[in-house]
Image (tube, rainbow, N blue to C red):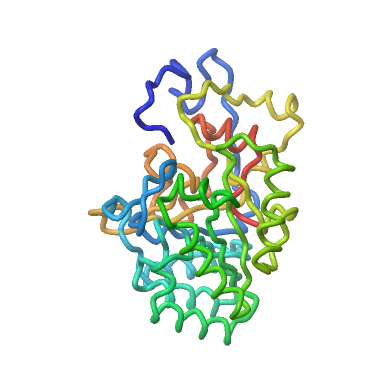
Amino acid sequence: MKDNAPQTANIGKFKNKLVTADGQTRASVALKNPETLWFNTGTLCNIECVNCYIASSPTNDALVYITTEEVRDYLDQIEERNWPVREIGFTGGEPFMNPEMIDMTRVALERGYEVLILTNAMLPMMRRKMREGLLDLKRNYGNKLTLRVSVDHYRPELHDEERGKGSFDKTITGMEWLRDNGFNIAVAGRTVWGDSDADSRAGYEAFFKQHSFDIDAQNLGQTVLFPEMDETVEVPEITTACWSILDKAPEALMCSNARMVVKRKGAEQPAVLACTLLPYEPEFEMGNTLAEAEADVHLNHPHCAKFCVLGGASCSG
């Protein structure tokens, strides 16, 4: 996001969680089918990207490393609440910066969940301890584990424009290691350069073929393309009337089927958030337990409108 841009858009909007600026009832989303529970492993990352929505970097520890015991506690809560979760997701920061990443993945896989890890596939993942741990997980749990690698653009110079010179080659090295060892790989790209969806997917398709990556560029779960999250852009507030106007159901939004657990610096225990995209917004922190996180989510942020309702984005496959 563009933090240094003048905040002239959306003045007067997104102030009241229940009512829009023009007095209409703000749309809300109920947790209907919790399929995915995300864990933010910490905001520390080995690189600092230009448009990182969570401002991850080698120095940002606003969200500290979550632990295996904390993950295990929330897995217990899933069972206690009888949530129909099928997938545990790990995001960061760079998850493989967290020294307990392999153990956290293992406890989720042991419970029978599918596990999705979002990674840049660079040096943290390629450390010997992590590679050995991943290989052990692959041997024991096979196709239950997927790694979604951030490839911002299929052209090296554009990827490096976001992530720093030489980043593309390091990511390819990691992806080739995953490929050669039979891991399930997906890719997350970005659409900040204005390419059409068709052109982007054609470019990724050629890129996958060039490197013999078994990834389907046309599959929305295997090749996920995220739009830029720019808070300076004017967006409409979403009212209850919008569902019928847009012919969209609340159940189509990510907050109807997912929650994210984070550990804030200085906090005694983790917190559960309504959305993976809003880790720093107090209004979207729902409490410390999954029981508290069953409350409705009011769409009181520009990202709710642009990114989710109008853009149709989802972090999960």
- Quadrant in which residue 98 is drawn: bottom left
Query: Percent position (x, y) of residue 155?
Result: 58, 50
Which residue is most to the left?
266
Q: Is residue 197 above or below residue 257?
A: above
- Quadrant in which residue 193 is drawn: top right
- In the depicted view, which residue is nearer to us: 40 or 195? 195
Quadrant position of the C terminus in the picture? bottom right
* 286 displayed left or right of 266: right
Residue at 57% in and 49% down: 153
Residue at 68% in and 25% down: 242
Query: Percent position (x, y) of residue 34?
Result: 60, 55
Query: Percent position (x, y) of residue 172?
Result: 53, 65
Quadrant position of the N terminus in the picture? top left
Query: Percent position (x, y) of residue 48?
Result: 36, 50
Residue at 30% in and 55% down: 58
- Quadrant in which residue 289 is drawn: bottom left
